[in-house]
């Protein structure tokens, strides 16, 4: 029997989603379309009568901004928003800032798919010579983490995302859900995929086929042990959602659709 509703949300479109660049730990704000997606998401959730008690975000602006816009559109601005680096997007290492289509043209679409969607393949780490290294690690938000800055990742597979996310899930989020609070997690494509893998028991192979579009809320209905009682539901116009998923998948093609 469904005891709890949990909502996962990949933030609205960010500036680098539009440019088809791996954004990861670079702090980009939402694009104009991303702002609209987040507001639309809030309007949809309000129209369907949902109410949140707590919102969790990463410490990247695009997920925080999305949470604010959703709550504003729902008229629930008072709801607490709690942030943790453990919900950050996957650290894409040396791939950060690179264009996916250009990478596919150089390394092949299959390699780009392996980097983006496989469970346990780790891209090369980011080095100090990388153009975004100091922008990331000199940012004072990374002084606030529950691990020393030196221990923060320099690259991650999806498995490593799950490894750093699960302690936060179990110790911080689970007790709130079990105490009856309705939680929204406003995070990222891969941090949400990692959590979905855990909650739904998706195999290492099958997680490669799971892609989340921006700004679309995912509803999970969970039993008392936080096991899903039915398939996840992506809320909204299903034809538009399928088109949005295809658009994200096609970002890894050498010549993305529309070019
Ligand atoms: O890091 C990024 O560029 C995207 C994910 O990229 P892909 O795994 O889809 O390539 O993360 P998000 O926009 O959810 O923060």
Image (cartoon, helix red, strand yellow):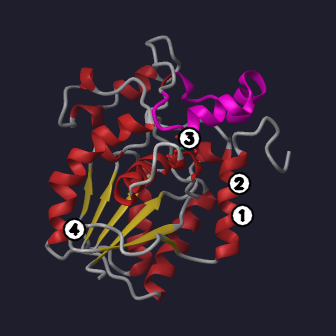
Q: Earlier in the sequence, mark 3 or mark 1?
A: 3
Residue behind mark 4: 225
The residues tagged by marks 3 and 1 sit, at their Cα atoms, a distance apart of 19 Å
In the displayed structure, would residue 200 be above or below residue 2?
above
Question: What SS does tag 4 mark?
Answer: loop
- Specify start and end residues of the magenta stretch as a single range: 94-121
The residues tagged by marks 2 and 1 sit, at their Cα atoms, a distance apart of 6 Å
| Quadrant of the image occupied by residue 165 | top left
Question: What SS does tag 2 mark?
Answer: helix
Residue 145 seen from this side: yes
Quadrant field for ligand 1: top right
Residue behind mark 3: 117
Question: What SS does tag 3 mark?
Answer: helix
Residue behind mark 1: 243
Q: Earlier in the sequence, mark 4 or mark 2?
A: 4
The N terminus - image quarter: bottom left
Does any atom of ligand 1 lie closer than 8 Å to the CB of label 4?
no
């Amino acid at each position: 029997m469904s005891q709890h509703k949990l909502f996962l949300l990949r933030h609205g479109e960010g500036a680098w989603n539009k440019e088809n660049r791996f954004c990861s730990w670079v702090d980009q704000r939402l694009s104009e379309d991303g702002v609209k997606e987040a507001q639309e998401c809030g309007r949809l959730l309000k129209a369907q009568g949902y109410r949140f008690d707590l919102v969790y975000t990463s410490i990247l602006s695009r997920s925080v901004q999305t949470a604010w816009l959703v709550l504003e559109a729902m008229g629930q601005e008072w709801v607490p928003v709690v942030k943790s680096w453990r919900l950050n997007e996957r650290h894409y290492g040396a791939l950060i800032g690179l264009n996916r289509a250009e990478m596919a043209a150089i390394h092949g679409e299959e390699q780009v798919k392996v980097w983006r969607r496989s469970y346990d393949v780790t891209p090369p780490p980011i080095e100090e010579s990388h153009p975004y290294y100091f922008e990331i690690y000199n940012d004072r938000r990374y002084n606030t983490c529950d691990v020393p800055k030196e221990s923060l990742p320099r690259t991650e597979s999806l498995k490593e995302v799950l490894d750093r996310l699960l302690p936060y899930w179990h110790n911080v989020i689970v007790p709130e859900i079990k105490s009856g609070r309705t939680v929204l997690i406003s995070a990222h494509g891969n941090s949400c995929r990692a959590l979905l893998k855990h909650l739904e028991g998706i195999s290492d192979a099958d997680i490669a086929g799971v892609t989340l579009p921006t700004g679309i809320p995912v509803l999970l209905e969970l039993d008392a042990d936080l096991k899903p009682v039915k398939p996840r539901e992506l809320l909204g116009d299903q034809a538009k959602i399928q088109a949005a998923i295809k658009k994200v998948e096609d970002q890894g093609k050498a010549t993305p659709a529309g070019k």
